Image (tube, rainbow, N blue to C red):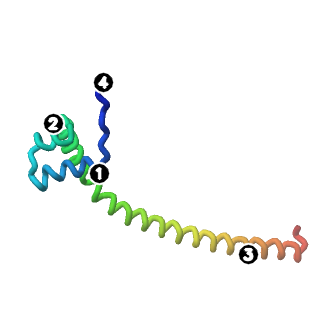
Amino acid sequence: MKKTRRKFTPQEKVKILRLHLLEHKPVSDLCDEYGLHPTVFYRWQKEFFEHGAAAFEHNNNGSAEKKLQQQLAQLKTKLTCKDEVIAEIVADHVRLKKELGLD
């Protein structure tokens, strides 16, 4: 009989790691309870600690991204205004050329 591989969601993995790290449940008990091999548990723990900083960086990147979006919107507005001014100047230039017969 073939065993099917069980997939754990990220939330389930964090829940299992939390049980060990915060509630001090032994790894052997958690592995028995959730049908895990200890090496899988320790790999999750290693990944959790290696990538844990990303959780904090995400918040900072979110505010930095928001600032960039605001700056981009301001620059687009400024560019639109400049385009309008240039269009007016070109229109005046064309009108003056026609009046002076330089066309």
Placement of 2 over or under 96, stated as above or below:
above
Of pointers 2 and 1, the one earlier in the residue sequence = 1
Gap in angstroms between the C-alphas marked 1 and 4: 27 Å
Where is the N terminus found, in terms of image quarters?
top left
Gap in angstroms between the C-alphas marked 3 and 4: 77 Å
Q: For the residue labelled by badge 1, is the local secondary structure a helix, a strand or a loop?
A: helix
- Residue on which the image places disc 3: 88
Q: Amino acid type of disc 4?
A: Lys
Is label 2 or label 4 in front? 4
**Residue 13: percent from the left, percent from the top?**
25, 47
The furthest residue to the right: 101
Which residue appears at 83% of the width and 76% of the height? 96
- Residue on which the image places disc 4: 2
Quick check: 78 left or right of 7? right
Query: What's the mark number on residue 38?
Result: 2
Is label 1 or label 4 in front? 4
Q: Amino acid type of disc 2?
A: Pro
Quick check: 13 left or right of 32? right
